[in-house]
Amino acid sequence: MLLGLLAMTRRRQYGEVANLLQGVVNVLEHFNKYMGIPQIRQLSERVKAAQNELGQQILADFEEAFPSQGTKRPGGPSNVLRDACLVANVLDPKIKQEIIKKFIKQHLSEYLVLFQENQDVAWLDKIDRRYAWIKRQLVDYEEKYGRMFPQEWCMTERIAVEFCHVTRTELAKIMRTRAKEIEVKLLLFAIQRTTNFEGLLAKRFSGCTLADGTVKKPEAPPPSTNPFLEDETGTETDEIVIEKSDTDKPKKPKVPDNPFHGIVSKCFEPHLYVYIESQDKNLSELIDRFVADFKAQGPPKPNMDEGGAVLPSCADLFVYYKKCMVQCSQLSTGEPMIALTTIFQKYLREYAWKILSGNLPKTTSSSGGLTITSLLKEKEGSEVAKFTLEELCLICSILSTAEYCLATTQQLEEKLKEKVDASLVERINLTGETDTFSIVISNSIQLLVQDLDAACDPALTAMSKMQWQNVEHVGDQSPYVTSVILHIKQNVPIIRDNLASTRKYFTQFCIKFANSFIPKFINHLFKCKPISMVGAEQLLLDTHSLKMVLLDLPSIGSQVVRKAPASYTRIVVKGMTRAEMILKVVMAPHEPPVVFVDNYIKLLADCSTDTFQKILDMKGLKRSEQSSMLELFRQRLPAPPSGVENSSSLSLSTPTPEQESSRIRKLEKLIKKRL
């Protein structure tokens, strides 16, 4: 059998050799455990020698058919070489690898000549010609040599893969030499054509020859992934959809569909700084255009039907970010993505300060000092608030835009983390930018509160300057109350309608206004001194009227009446009830002093001597009376809880002189009548 094998080898009857050699190899495998027997060992060595001779002969045949030197190629495949490939499958794998290596090298030798570094077609602007060349070569190979090599050798794919390796090396070399000539448009053109070619390879080949480690499968997601939308298979649009549940969904690593992604385009990564610098410049120009457009077009027009409008420039910015995201995810998932994130952060901050904060209306110094006389002359609808209707709408629009930016920036951070390599995820952090937009929101709300607060200041000043000791009878609500209600009715509906899409921030506005106005009202209440009994009754009526208006503030002037948020209602009730209690203490007789002090402690639960001093000033007590009263107050403070409870019977409802109790009952009836 062995002699026959050698004879057929010399005659190059590779078809028969392949069948016979496989049988010989199978037989020897059964005798492996008997290699200690000299005859069997000798036979095994003769077979190995025959295999070596056969391998060298086949390599020589391929060298003759496909010479590594010279440019002339044979006209077509050989049946002898086809059978030789079958023999190579049985021989040492190195023989097969050597055949493949030499054939592919000879097949690509023309490519290296045509696209040498000094050739015009070698530069990036003619990169299409490289890919057109390999497409023609693969078609030529299939027609001429497709049946010569066994199908499981995947020769077509191997030729394409080797072409990619050579191309990546050659492009990297020429780009290093001519780095100064690389412009962003040229770079993106080359990358686009290259990634398109890699996509074609994925459609044509399985990537089975990549398993030997010649190229690593990238971790990057497919280039078509939309960075803002969860539905990544749909068509990209120019709108960014904010999904509140997006950040709550578990993030799974995406496996790329294209095993050839980066096999050539990886060479462009060292030059992506050109792209990043270009985006920096483009975004700088975009922000400048936003600033110029805002100055030219002015603030958005008031729209009471649809609520506060988000500034159009906000959508434009994030649409551009989305395009950069998609583009950069095609180029790299490594350091360039981190560099792009830094650029994003820079211009998110610039947008927040130049477009949003920079266009918030400026406050001016208040013009206080109005008297009750001027309030009486104030006409219906007169403008006391600092900001115009357009300015109020602009503040609301900026607030709505900042909220949109904040939510979209959070989503942008999540998408960036999905795109970058796992080792770089921790370096993606946009918390500083979201905090910046939160500051814009807070400042906008504060401006709205200050505006309404300042509009009410002249009325409170007038209240504190009235001669309350000269009030002779309790009438309708005072003019200063009417003025406050007027300003509330002017501002609040505008703010509510323009923040219709951001109800939580309208609630924040209401809460902040209540927290600002009520303490200020109480401070002005303390300035009303001295106060007669009738004056205190009038102030109590005014306070109750303001309390009712404040409780209704969130839905004032609205056709749809909503229940005010409980958090807001608690603040108003607590604050205005304190104001009512202050006036009730003022109305109470200060004789006997012990009863007065105990009632104060019970009604106000305020241990501050300063507050008690203010109450005494409002009552108009002399300094000598105040001194003894303050001393008594200090003595009553350390009293045990049981003592306070025992004194609870001495409240304002305790029978006092008949005249005082009748005045309180009269006031209560008047309030009920008003309601």
Image: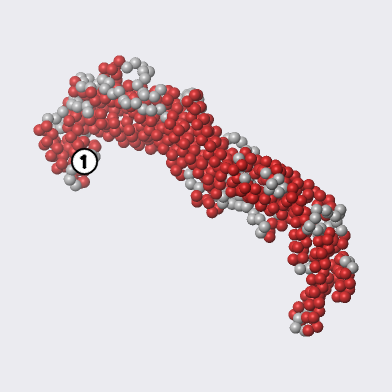
Q: Residue at x 67, y 50 (%)?
A: 170
Q: Tell me the residue that label 1 is attached to.
A: 607
Residue furthest to the left: 624
Give the x, y percent position of residue 508.
Answer: 40, 35
Work out whether residue 662 or residue 297 is closer to the camera in this orientation and state it: 297
Work out whether residue 662 or residue 494 is closer to the camera in this orientation and state it: 494
Give the x, y percent position of residue 527.
Answer: 22, 28
Side of 264 where 14 appears, left or right: right
> Image quarter for residue 58?
bottom right
172 is higher (above) or lower (below) than 392: below
Residue 592 visible? The answer is no
Q: Residue at x 20, y 43 (%)?
A: 644
Quarter in which the N terminus is drawn: bottom right
Give the x, y percent position of residue 32.
Answer: 76, 78
Side of 381 where 13 appears, left or right: right
Q: Residue at x 21, y 46 (%)?
A: 641
Q: Residues within 10 Å of mark 1 (few under 14, many from 20)?
A: some
> Image quarter for residue 568?
top left
Work out whether residue 637 or residue 327 is closer to the camera in this orientation and state it: 327
Which secondary structure lies at badge 1?
loop
Residue 409 visible? The answer is yes
